[in-house]
Image (tube, rainbow, N blue to C red):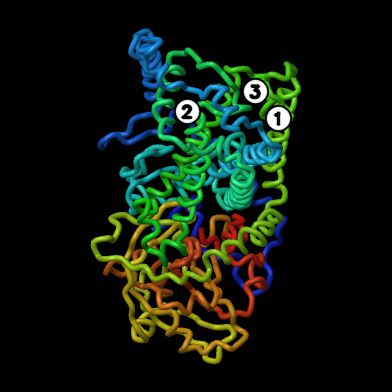
């Protein structure tokens, strides 16, 4: 069984010891494949291809647009009718009894007349800059597996939302095949199969998002500014309903202006964004970490499972985008120039009218646009630099947060997924096909390098050494997951057999398969990870011999790592001092060619 070059994934770098092709050549190749050669060949993300599942059918989200329009008109009509009644809009009605905004007299008597401090302006401006990059890179990550699920198993046609059509049933269809193209106008950096680059930007700006948020929260409570943001009375809820009815009737409440205070609906909205949705974005992101999921089994269950956390992560992004759109709409509707003066310059509306705020806001938007244009270009022209910056920053943070958590999660037989996405290029070499046609009777695993006892082992030899079953969760860098039962040799037994020298700190795994851009696929793992009891050389899957598409005759399982590290169709293993002496020196084929981060544990 063979596949086209589409299924980049589990195969080896440039193979032999010593440096492979240089970074500039790999960068040019990446640019050609991911952006230019893919252009127009594969579907792009667009509204026409977005479908939501209702029951067993998928319905285009285009149907949501007229539904939203009709629903919006109905809400306005109902709100206007309510406001015309004495019970709601009359002098003694609900909106009068529960004012949308507090009176200025109450604010002054309570000492709650706030302006907008400089630190709040600065952190808000920085947050907008950060969020544009986070969202754009997040869309690019989603494009690599454009389906969202509510079950762990990620079975095709069981997703609740998808951004492309159904999975073809007439051929082997890998998760890499399923990726879609994204315009650089939407995604960062655009193209197809650029998830490695997108993750660098996403995580770099995630860290800035967290740091900026910490600064904002600390200063909010240290300055007393929290009283403008945090509700302190239950009356805010009926007041917020009053606001909602008035806004919906297109009768805007009397505007004090956000310079002094927020009305009830604004306060609840801003509180939710800062103290509910922002933490939820962080927590659901962590729930997609294989290191976390495979050590703290309870954590992902807070959200239901890993895929629900992924869906929530996406929905929080939608909330952020909608919130900003509504926020700017209300800024424009209630005095664009005056509001922007307050937002950008801390100038109260009573201080007079000018266009300084609009000019600064326009300048900020221009800066964000220019930076994004530069970032797209930088992603294609200095991809290796971006990768190294990310490895030196994000990689260190990931190691600090997750590296100490050894995997331990295992599942029951009934948890095994009914579908397990295949990935990678099935080997096409004559050597592998000869072995395959002979039932792998002549297969020999070569184990060499910095060891006292180099060996060549047949499958029977491997099976005779030791045996372990484990049911574990597979986490792909693309976002899908599955639970499978693996049978094979604990790698620690092989370590004991070959007796590595003290200088051996890493192990290189080479595959019979090729990578997506040609050349032998390979990857590397630390001795520490491979000594773990769940690190396995698997020759069985779900109580059957290992299927061809999943790596026969032998594949790797290292459960705290993402799927691209689980090398399939293993040909040989070499114990080495440092992976930097192999391939392009980044630790693996996808690190060399697709600029993945090394040990991307989240």
Taking the spot 41% from the left edge, 30% from the top edge, the residue there is 235
Q: How far from the left and from the top, in percent, is residue 388?
A: 68, 59
Foreground residue among 3 and 421: 421
Residue 522, can we see it?
yes
Which sits earlier in the primary sequence, circle 2 or circle 3? 2
Q: Is residue 147 above or below residue 326?
A: below
Whether residue 56 sits left or right of residue 93 in the image: it is left
Q: How far from the left and from the top, in percent, is residue 233?
A: 44, 35
Q: How far from the left and from the top, in percent, is residue 209?
A: 60, 47
In the rendered view of the protein, which quadrant contains the N terminus? bottom left
Q: Which residue is mark 2?
A: 265
Q: In the orientation shown, which residue stands out farthest toward the bottom?
A: 452
Secondary structure under tag 3 reads helix
Q: Is residue 244 above or below residue 547?
A: above
Q: Which residue is mark 1?
A: 346
Secondary structure under tag 1 reads loop
In front of the other: label 3 or label 1?
1
How far apart marks 1 and 2 lie (CA) works out to 22 Å
Residue 189, can we see it?
no
Whether residue 263 sits left or right of residue 379 in the image: it is left
């Amino acid at each position: 069984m063979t596949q086209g070059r589409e299924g980049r994934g589990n195969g080896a770098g440039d193979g032999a010891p010593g440096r492979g092709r240089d970074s500039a050549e790999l960068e040019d190749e990446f640019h050609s494949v991911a952006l230019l050669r893919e252009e127009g060949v594969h579907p792009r993300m667009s509204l026409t291809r977005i479908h939501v599942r209702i029951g067993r059918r998928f319905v285009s989200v285009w149907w949501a647009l007229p539904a939203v329009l009709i629903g919006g008109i109905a809400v306005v009509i109902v709100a206007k009718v309510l406001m015309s009644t004495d019970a709601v809009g009359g002098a003694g009605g609900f909106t009068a009894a529960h004012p949308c905004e507090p009176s200025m007299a109450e604010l002054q008597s309570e000492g709650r007349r706030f302006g907008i401090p400089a630190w709040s302006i600065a952190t808000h401006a920085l947050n907008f800059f950060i969020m544009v990059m986070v969202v754009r890179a997040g869309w690019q990550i989603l494009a690599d597996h454009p389906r969202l699920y509510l079950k762990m198993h990620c079975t095709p046609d069981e997703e609740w939302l998808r951004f492309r059509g159904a999975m073809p049933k007439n051929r082997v269809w890998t998760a890499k095949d399923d990726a879609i193209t994204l315009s650089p106008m939407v995604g960062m950096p655009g193209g197809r199969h650029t998830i490695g680059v997108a993750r660098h930007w996403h995580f770099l700006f995630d860290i800035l998002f967290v740091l900026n948020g910490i600064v904002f929260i600390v200063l909010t409570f240290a300055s007393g500014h929290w009283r403008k943001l945090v509700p302190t009375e239950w009356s805010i809820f009926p007041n917020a309903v009053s606001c909602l009815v008035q806004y919906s009737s297109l009768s805007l409440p009397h505007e004090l202006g956000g310079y002094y205070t927020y009305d009830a609906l604004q306060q609840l909205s801003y509180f939710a964004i800062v103290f509910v949705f922002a933490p939820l974005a962080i927590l659901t992101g962590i729930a997609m970490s294989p290191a976390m999921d495979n050590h703290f089994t309870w954590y992902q269950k807070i959200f239901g499972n890993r895929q629900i956390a992924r869906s929530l992560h996406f929905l929080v992004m939608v909330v952020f985008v909608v919130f900003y759109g509504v926020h700017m709409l209300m800024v424009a509707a209630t005095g664009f120039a005056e509001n922007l003066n307050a937002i950008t310059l801390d100038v109260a509306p009573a201080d007079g009218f000018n266009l300084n705020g609009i000019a600064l806001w326009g300048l900020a938007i221009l800066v964000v646009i220019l930076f994004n244009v530069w970032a797209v270009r930088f992603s294609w022209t200095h991809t290796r630099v971006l990768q190294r910056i990310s490895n030196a920053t994000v990689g260190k943070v990931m190691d600090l947060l997750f590296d100490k958590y050894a995997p331990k999660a295992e599942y029951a037989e009934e948890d095994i997924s009914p579908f397990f996405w295949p990935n990678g290029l099935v080997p096409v070499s004559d050597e592998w096909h000869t072995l395959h046609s002979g039932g792998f009777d002549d297969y020999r695993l070569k184990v060499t390098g910095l060891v006292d006892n180099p060996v060549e082992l047949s499958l029977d030899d491997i099976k005779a050494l030791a045996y372990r079953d484990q049911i574990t969760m597979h986490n792909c860098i693309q976002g899908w997951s599955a639970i499978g039962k693996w049978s094979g040799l604990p790698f620690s037994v092989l370590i004991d057999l070959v007796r590595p020298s003290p200088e051996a700190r890493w192990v290189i795994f080479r595959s019979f398969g090729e990578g997506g851009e040609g050349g032998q696929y390979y990857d590397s793992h630390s001795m520490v990870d491979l000594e773990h009891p769940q690190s396995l050389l698997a020759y069985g899957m779900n109580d059957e011999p290992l299927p061809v598409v999943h790596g026969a005759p032998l594949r790797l399982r290292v459960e705290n790592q993402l799927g691209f590290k689980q090398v399939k169709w293993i040909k040989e293993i070499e114990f080495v001092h440092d992976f930097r002496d192999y391939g392009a020196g980044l630790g693996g084929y996808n690190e060399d060619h697709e600029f993945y981060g090394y040990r991307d544990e989240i």
